[in-house]
Amino acid sequence: MKLICLTFVSLFFQIISFAVVTEGHQINDFPIIGVLAQEVYSPKPGENAYIAASYVKYLESAGARVVPVMINRTEEEYTKLFKSINGIHFPGGGVSMFSSGYAKAAGIFYNLALEANSKGDYFPVWGTCLGFEQLTLLTSGKFLLSKTNTSGVALPLKFTNESKDSRMFKDFPEDLITSLANEPLTENSHQWSITTESFTGNEKLKNFYRILSTNADGQTEFVSTVEAYDFPIYATQWHPEKNAFEWTHTYIPHSTAAIRTTFYMAQFFVNEARKSLHKFPSQKEEQNALIYNFQPTYTGSKSSFEQTYYFD
Ligand SMILES: *[C@@H]1O[C@H](CO)[C@@H](O)[C@H](O)[C@H]1NC(C)=O
Ligand SMILES: *[C@@H]1O[C@H](CO)[C@@H](O)[C@H](O)[C@H]1NC(C)=O
Ligand SMILES: *[C@@H]1O[C@H](CO)[C@@H](O)[C@H](O)[C@H]1NC(C)=O
C-alpha cells in the first residue's frame, strides 16, 4: 500500500511538473534573485558594502527569495552564481558607473545574461535608477547622461504608444495604468538622466530597448522605463520598491495606487525569474547564499533607507 501511495505521489508530481509550462517556458515556482551590493560612501569595519532592504522586501513580496551579490568577487565566482540564480537586480545608488565593484559585477552579469538568453537559457535582468543608467552604459558603450532636476520628486509616467503591448505593462489593471499616467506615483531620486533625444539618437540603445515611458523635469524630457526587444532586460529610472517600503522622504508616494504599483512591478519581474531554471548545486549552497544569513540594520534616522544590509 505504501509503495502504491509513493508511486501515486511521484506520478502526481510528474503531472504537475509537466502541467506548468506556459508560453513555452517551464515554470520554476522557487525563484531566487540576486541583488547587487555596492560600496558604502564612508566605509567602516564590517560595513564596506550595502544593499537597501527595500529591494529585498520588494522581491520577497512577489514570491522570490534573495541572494546578495557581493562586489569585488572574481569572474569565476560570478559565473558560478549566475548558474545558480534566476535573475539579477541592479539597485539604485551612488557609485561609479566605470570603476566601482558594482559596475564591474553588473558588466559581468549583463554579458552572461546576453549569452545565456541568446542560447535559450532564460535569465532576466532589472536595473533601477543607477541600475538603469548602468544598463544604458553597458548597452551603448557610452556615457550618455545629462543633469536633470529630479533628485526627489514623484511623477506620473508619460506612457509611449508602445507601452500598451509591452511585456511589462500589458497585464497591469486598466485602472492602475490610468493612475500611473495621471498621478505622481513614481519616485525619482536621480541627478542624471538620459534624454529621449540622446536615447533615440544612439543606434545601439534605440535598437535594443523599447521605450515604455518618458518624464520631464519641467525642461528636459528623459526616458523613464524601458524593456529590451529581444531580451528579458528591464529598467526604470524611477523606484518601484520605495512606495511600499521607504518612508524617509515626504515625496515618496504611499497611496493605495502607489502601493499597488510596487506590487505589480515586483510581480512582473518575479514572474520573469520563474521562467529561469537555474539552480544551486546543492541545498546547502543555496542556504548559505540566501540573504536570510544577514540581518538588516535600522538606518531610517540617518539615511534614505529605513533598513540596510551591511556587508564586510
Ligand atoms: C573593492 O576593491 C577596491 C579596489 O579594487 C577597494 O578599493 C574596495 O575597498 C573594495 N571594496 C570592498 C567592499 O571589498
Ligand atoms: C526643481 O524641481 C523642483 C520641483 O521638483 C522645483 O521646486 C525647483 O524649483 C526646481 N529647480 C530648478 C532649478 O529648476
Ligand atoms: C500615438 O498614438 C496616438 C493616437 O493613436 C497618435 O496620435 C500619436 O501620433 C502616436 N504617437 C507616436 C509617437 O507614434
Image: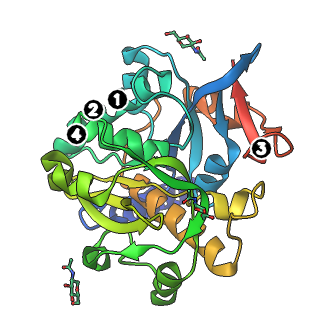
Say whether residue 8 is visible: yes
* Vertical order, 57 against 187 (above or below): above
Element type where label 1 sits in the image: helix
Q: Position of residue 97 (x, y in %)?
A: 42, 30
Question: Which residue does the image show at 34% across and 27% down from the upper left?
Answer: 108
Element type where label 3 sits in the image: strand
Camera-near label (1 vs 2) is 1
Colour scheme of the picture: rainbow
Real-space CA distance between mark 3 and mark 1, rounded to the nearest whole angstrom:
27 Å
Real-space CA distance between mark 1 and mark 2, rounded to the nearest whole angstrom:
6 Å
Q: Dot 3 corresponds to which residue?
A: 307
Q: Dot 2 corresponds to which residue?
A: 111
* Label 1, residues with CA under 10 Å away: few <14, some 14-19, many ≥20: some
Real-space CA distance between mark 4 and mark 1, rounded to the nearest whole angstrom:
12 Å
Q: Position of residue 255 (x, y in %)?
A: 70, 77
Q: Amino acid at mark 2?
A: Asn
- The first of marks 4 and 2 along the sequence is 2
- The first of marks 2 and 3 along the sequence is 2
Q: Amino acid at mark 4?
A: Ser
Q: Position of residue 124 (x, y in %)?
A: 36, 49
- Mark on residue 107? 1
Seen from the viewer's position, the closer of residues 97 and 164 is: 97
Element type where label 2 sits in the image: helix
Q: Position of residue 172 (x, y in %)?
A: 45, 79
Report the side of 262 relative to 121 (left or right).
Answer: right
